[in-house]
Image (spheres, rainbow, N blue to C red):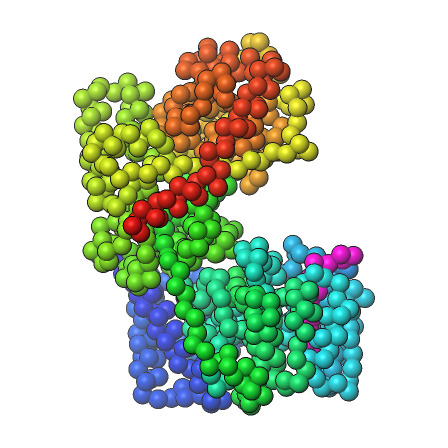
Amino acid sequence: MSLKKIGNWIRLQNYNTGLKIIKRYYPETEVEKKSCMISIGFLLLYLKRLFYVLIYLPFANAETFSKYFQSKSIKEFLMRLLGFYKTQPVNSKLDNKYSVLNFSKSSKPLVSIVINTSGNGLYTYNCLRSVLKNTTAVAYEIIVLNHNNTDFSYQKFVDNAVTQITDLKEDNVTKLQNLASEIANGDFLCFLDSEVIPNEKWLENLLAVFNYDQESGVVAPKLIYPYGLLKAAGSVINEVGKQTNIGEFQEVDQFEYNFIKEIDYCNSAGLLVKKADFIGTGKFNPDIKNADYVFADFCYRLKSQLDKKIYYQPLSSYVDFRLNKEVADPTFFVDIWRDTLAKPKVQDRKESILIIDAVIPKPDQDSGSRRIFEIVKLFQALNLNTYFLAHKGLREEPYYSSLVNIGARVICQKHIKEKMVKKLPIILPFIDFVWISRLDINSIYGPVIKSIKSVPWLNDTVDLHFIRIRRELELAGMDLSKIEEKINPIRTLELKLAKLADYTITVTEVEREVLMQKGIDKVVVIPNIHEDQISDSKTLKFDQRKNIIFIGSYKHEPNIDAALWLANEIMPEVWKTDPTIKLILLGSNPSTEVIALKSDRIEVPGFIHDVSPFFLQARVFVAPLRFGAGMKGKIGQSLEFGLPIVSTYIGIEGMDLENEKDVLVAENTNEFAEHILRLYQTPELWNKIHINSIQAIEEYKPKSVLKKLRLLLNALNS
């Protein structure tokens, strides 16, 4: 074992020991209001912690040491040394250096944020400050409720954009919340307690759940203790009215608390609801005195009266400073909901599919990612619980959140050395189907899954590697016998996995036929998925367009080869006739040789999140792919925009596109230059290809691919 691996192992043991200390200490502090820091159990954990700290010193870096020596006191230093620290970075520092908060007053807010003050101006100020800082993508207004004995010290730091309702005689905040709903201008109401700090994108992510499910009634956030442990991932109430916070004192990053799911009700720290639903349900019940039971009663009424769902959204999180109060008398609430509480909880009986890929997909960077992202959406549309396991990589934004917000249950590394295969025994008991993408990932996970559980395994080839590699080597002029020697092990492995799997997925009919000829009989074509991206208002006419574009991830060798051929050989022939035409090489991760192509006539902009303006304004798309396999996402992307294409036959392989009808096909430099100029200079030809390319995308639309997936699932269940 290398020193680096030893250091990583020690670091992990050190972290886990500190976590055990925190998970023992803080629940006692919160619930019992006392600390049992001195006991045999704690002393053993302290010794273990100190042991790991000492032996980790030779492996530690400057950043690790700084965490200790930045302590403000000897007590803080010793507490950290013994393992008392936040389990993760949380925004738990209250800012007492007051400064003016300038809110912009929206004439048409989407959300009205109603904040119940706690009686402590410092908390109210910090809640408002966090809302201002972390609510950037949503139009909102703020209504602050001042009641009973409230500290008004925060008021001089807020401007007139904040509406305040003050009633110092009223000790029933529920009445003021109901009043606020009547004057609110937003389509949504968000009720907040002032003793919470909303984190980044909190409101944006709450709203995302209403896009995920149109039957959403209430959406609740994740609540985190200031020391970093989970406070609530939703809440439940049993038949006698006892309230329980789901996941309390667990790690915030534990998988089971990090996907959108239905819950009983939400904690009174905050919820988001449509104003129409709030009014239609009769608002909050002012006769219930405890805030949590008020929220629970409202959630139960919303479900029973409007048949709406209550959701927990892990991507929206608040740091919750409220002290755990004495348990309220549930009698009044139980009397109202006795029959409902007595019913057994409905278990989730939906079928589940586990999708495994190399990394979390980045659909704006490569076509393989976009395809798997769209497939996740389609499985959700088929009413399956969709789990997604990434073989490598930590949570990377915005891609992790994008998956969670379409309903996926995402499992990825918590630390860079974590072996995700070890997660399978925990996950597989809940899984009915497994979909594994790419050759290397299938070879790692497929046989392991079969050894654990007899579950249908779908082997998604993405492309047949032995075909792509053979074409590349043929283009390079390698001897046929050496080519065969090179690809034989890869072909053998691909065919072996195809035989082991219950079904093998190809992206094109061409590859399906290759496998069928090799004796693989259960093969299904699931192509790339594309949707129209054009409209009459956005689509420019022929004479309003200019320039030529190509797109591709330059981590993929066929794209580098295509870009070099296009820039160095094809375009010089085009420029002999029209030197004003520019070539734009779009795509992520441009290699050194691609970047070197930059000139007055060639642009290499690098990664751009939204490339639609380029497709909407260009006159021709060129795809001079000389090797590769599978369906090419760049071709489908161009068809989405109705942008006429010049490509090789390899580029349009498996898409049933016809030369001179849907596309123009060229196989050598002169043909490419000739066809580019024909399209670029002939409006009649351009318009014909434009119209036909729009029609050609029909087979690859989500509704068409959804039918294929439904048939596949039916076959697996038969």
Quarter where residue 331 is shown? bottom right
- x, y percentage for residue 176? 73, 78
The residue under the point 30% across, 76% down is: 48
- x, y percentage for residue 456? 28, 51
Residue 64 falls left or right of residue 522 = right
Q: Is residue 288 above or below residue 365?
A: below
The residue under the point 34% across, 80% down is: 46
Q: Is residue 263 above or below residue 583?
A: below
Which residue is more in the foreground, 212 or 566?
212
Decide if residue 366 is in sight here.
no
Residue 209 falls left or right of residue 502 = right
Q: Is residue 463 above or below residue 192?
A: above
User: Farthest residue in the right direction?
Assistant: 160
Specify start and end residues of the magenta stretch as a single range. Answer: 106-122
Q: Is residue 617 above or below residue 244?
A: above
- x, y percentage for residue 592? 45, 31
The residue under the point 22% across, 50% down is: 447
Residue 678 falls left or right of residue 623 = right
The residue under the point 61% across, 15% down is: 684
Q: Is residue 73 magenta?
A: no
Decide if residue 182 is in sight here.
yes
Q: How many marks?
A: 0
- x, y percentage for residue 93? 58, 71
Which residue is more in the foreground, 439 or 519?
519
